[in-house]
Amino acid sequence: MATVNKNFLKLNGGYLFPEIARRTKAWQERHPGVSIMRLGIGNTTEALSPAVCAAMKQKIDKLSSRETYSGYGDEQGDTYLRDALVTYYKEHWKVELRNTEFFISDGAKSDAANIQQLFGEDAVVAVQDPSYPVYVDSNVIAGRTGSYDETDFCYQGFVYLKSDLSNGFVPAPPKEKVDLIYLCSPNNPTGAVASREQLKVFVDYALANKSVIIFDSAYSEYITESKYPHSIFEIEGSRKCAIELSSFSKFAGFTGVRLGWTIIPHELECEGTEEGMLNRMWNRRQCTFFNGASNIAQAGGAASLSGEGYKECRALVGYYQRNAKVIKEGLESVGLSCYGGINSPYVWAQTPSGLTSWEFFDLLLDKCHVVVTPGSGFGPSGEHYVRVSSYGHFEDVVSAMESIRRNLVI
């Protein structure tokens, strides 16, 4: 008799972003004709760059001819794109990598969920709190946690690395021994960026404990201050203890195009492995479960990494950074305490008057017609905060802030 994976039943409620969509739709049905300004989900809104579009159109033209048509590509990603990423890391971040350490995927979210398949079912997991929900949910489904605690808003068996105002929203390593550590910098949702010194402490911890850091750098192109590292591999010793996930989504606007990458250094080790083993295991996993990313998307990704494509994508990042500045200034003008929004597309705003995250979500929707993301959906330390996304048209962002100034009474 077939049975279900009972770990799915441990998941707390619905996934955060569909729940926001459900509540917003219900509100619109009660208020027909009222326009909503959406600053919730981190979905890009501006057109792809001309150079990226030209590269993808050129690839489509090749696919339209029998003589130049290509089918499946390499499961690891097309060699020219992996070579372009090697050059990108070397030129921009002074990081030396090999193309056999890059694995191209359909996005960092997929890899963030799938990467835990490399590790034992009994692995003890630590996660930056608050953090992107997929880090937690994928490990719950894998059976690495106990039940959800309704009182403390957390899963039993997980180690939550508290990130709050007291530590600048950048946590310290756990006191106990853990096996996997999920970090994201610039952080989604708080917008905080870890310094070299803060990351070095985590690397030293991982080396001492044979732990593996799973480092999400999807927002690295938003870092404007040179004192912060863009890649975990800028930190000495990290090649032996870290995996890096990244994406074209928020840099090149590929949220719907779908393209990302994972870096697994050959030197990476954990307990019971030898050098190169984890890289080979992930290669086998990809060859077994994945037929490679879209060859059209890969052509666009390569175009975004250099020359005019890179300049145009940097301009796209600048557009959203201007939005973030407007959001932060707008929220602060009504007395809200705000963080992030400088090296990140997200502004992390504290709720007023002790309101819960969802209560403030409802207040902003009812009074201002603005949708944000409740911070509690990112973990227990996210309660009493909301995440405000800069991914919107500039004129809509301005309108949203004007509405908040006019209508929000706190």
Image (spheres, rainbow, N blue to C red):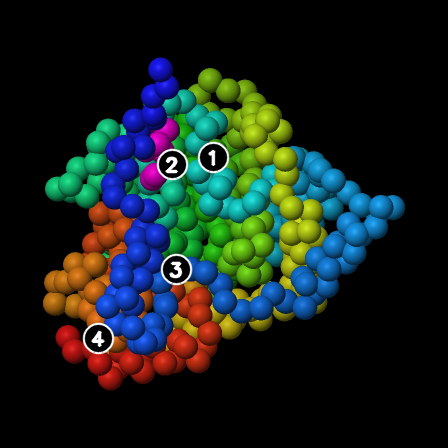
* Quadrant placement of the N terminus: top left
Which span is picked out in magenta? Answer: 136-144
Whether residue 142 appears in magenta in the rendering, the answer is: yes
- Quick check: is 249 in the magenta stretch? no
The label on residue 41 is: 3
Q: Earlier in the sequence, mark 1 or mark 2?
A: 1
Which residue is at 42% across, 55% downward?
186
- Residue 138 - label: 2
Residue tagged by mark 4? 367
Front: mark 4 or 1: 4
Give the distance between the C-alpha atoms of the residues marked 3 and 1, in whole angstroms.
22 Å
Q: Is residue 197 visible?
A: no
Instruction: Say what secondary structure mark 3 lies in.
Output: loop
- The amino acid sitting under disc 1 is Asn
Q: Are marks 1 and 2 in contact (CB under 8 Å)?
A: yes
Residue drawn at x 32%, y 36% is 126
Q: Amino acid at mark 2?
A: Ser
Q: Is residue 383 visible?
A: yes
Mark 1 packing: few (<14 Cα in 10 Å), some, or many (20+)?
A: some
Residue for badge 1? 114
In this rendered view, identify the residue nearer to me: 15 or 329.
15
Above or below for 356 versus 122 = below
Gap in Å between the C-alphas at discs 4 and 1?
40 Å
**Disc 2 element:** helix
Tell me how far mark 3 sits from mark 2, CA to CA. 20 Å
Viewer-nearest residue: 212 or 95: 212
Residue 329: x and y, percent? 33, 77
